[in-house]
Amino acid sequence: MPRDDFADDDTGPIRRVPGEHGTPPPGERRARPRREPGAAGAPDADGPPRRRRPAGQPARKAAEQPADKAAERPPRRAAPPARPAGSAGTAGSTGADSEAPRKTRREPAKPAARTGRRRAEPPEPAATGHGQGQQGHGHGHGHGPAAPASRQVRLLLIWLLAPIALATVAGVLLLYPWGKSLPESVASGGTPVQADITAVATGPCLAAGQVRVGDQPDGTQPGDKPCLSTDVRMTDGPASGRTVRLIVPIEPSTPRFTAGDQVVLAYNGGDVADPSSYVLKDFQRGLPLLLLAGLFALAVIVLGRWQGVAALVALALSFVVLALFVLPAILAGENPLLVAIAGAGLIMFIALYLTHGLSARTSVAVLGTLASLALIGLLSVLFSAASSLTGLDDSTASLIGSLGHGIDARGLLLAGVVIGALGVLDDITVTQTSAVWELRRANPSLSWRELYAAGLRIGRDHVGSAVNTLVMAYAGAALPVLLVSAISGVGLGSVLGSQDIAQEIVRTLAGSVGIVAAVPVTTVLAALIASREGVDELKNPSSPKKNS
């Protein structure tokens, strides 16, 4: 193993003492030109480090010198008179009689030219960062302005997204029912009235003033079903404070009411004192829902802080778009699929940019979401037509009965597919773009192909859970339909081919294909754009390595 010791029979081994900065890296030591042997010493502020000699060479040169000259030579630890004081790493020098011949042999070396460079200027690799040296990728932490490619990327994203945003706004303005009154239900359910149940009793299904004669102690005849007699005190409406007695049949499909329940009555506009003017409809659920919503908002704000607040605002605006645009436009007779596409586009722009900010990363997520939504809509149109799906399930039939006129039931089915897949797609596209950008920031030397490969590996894990989430969400919504089909006894093929089940299958599989496609589409867009971003654009401004 090579050593820096200079063995000498008279003075003993002379060791090289490291300077203030220690031994330079091997690559840097090899890159330095040879220094003249007369300025032997350790690395310090006044001269470069002594070049490492091969093992055995010092002993051989010492043996070649005459014995009398070796005895007359001064010790190597004595510093030359011309050497400046204060060099912390000096290990000594040779005598004047042995220094002159060596200078004659190795005169081309110029240690004086390198003497201040090593301490006064940082080595060149430190300017580029990431250990790439002068031939690195050039995205170091030390450069100032952002790379021009970032401006080009932003302009490219603007040119891609501006037409889509304008088309979305134009679609909303054209499809909104300006000046049209919304249709009213022909099967009115009455005016809601809040009330409290003060007493309940089980007995015959008799109205006030009616009497049943029989031997049954409870007044019911064999085979008759009992009813629940409830005393209800209204807390609002035209008869606030009045108590009426309502009879509710006890059926498996009716809820169970007890004393103390807060309920909702339907008032049909008749005599306020007549019990027949009221129908017991449902429970009041306002307070529990408000408490749950408050808990949800608190959890989002505690974890997300200001970004959580922005997410809540985006969620509220999404409901505003649904309530003030999507529902009125469909009820006014517009094509449900076109309304859903315009509404989903508006929700996407609002939610993503408000939650994640105006950035190239968010714009890539928007592009990926748009491409996936287009694929989902196309697959839904093709396979709903190929499967002869009408969209006329029980809920749609009830809607048509309330409207009193027909509606595009298949378009309503497709609109539900697009809007239902939007939330899951946002999660996929935002996650993929964030993963690619973080990979780029962690290793700026990665090419776009390497970024795409690494991001795709992350996406494969994510897409499995996302598809399962979508399938379980649709299965949970269609659980009663699945149970009815299971007890029908007509066979699995007939069950799966029924209208209610087949439309859920198309909804689930079309959405799942869009989710799967969103991963490579979004990842390749993110890799292409992130690879052209400057490192300073990717770094956190609060990072302590900003100017390192």
Image (tube, rainbow, N blue to C red):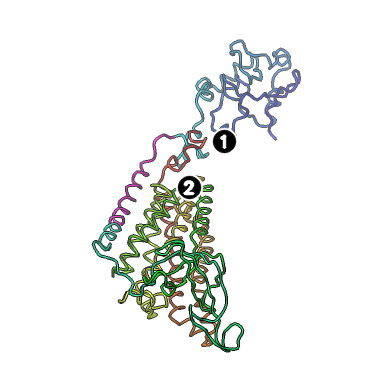
Q: Is residue 89 above or below residue 474?
A: above
Residue interval drawn in magenta: 143-166
The amino acid sitting under disc 1 is Gly
Residue at label 1? 27
| Crowd band around label 1 with a 10 angstrom C-alpha radius: few (<14), some (14–19), many (20+) | few
Numbered label tally: 2
Image coords of residue 429 (percent x, y):
44, 57
Q: Is residue 95 above or below residue 348?
A: above
Asked which secondary structure carries label 1, the reply is: helix
Mark found first going from the N terminus, 1 or 2: 1
Residue at the top extreme of this rendering: 81
Tell me what residue is drawn at x 55 percent, y 84 percent.
225
Image coords of residue 171 (percent x, y):
28, 61
The amino acid sitting under disc 2 is Arg
Tell me what residue is drawn at x 46 percent, y 60 percent.
519
Residue at label 2? 440
Image coords of residue 477 (percent x, y):
49, 71
Q: On the rendered image, what quadrant is the N terminus found in?
A: top right
Between marks 1 and 2, how big is the CA–CA gap?
A: 27 Å
State yes or no: residue 46 in magenta: no
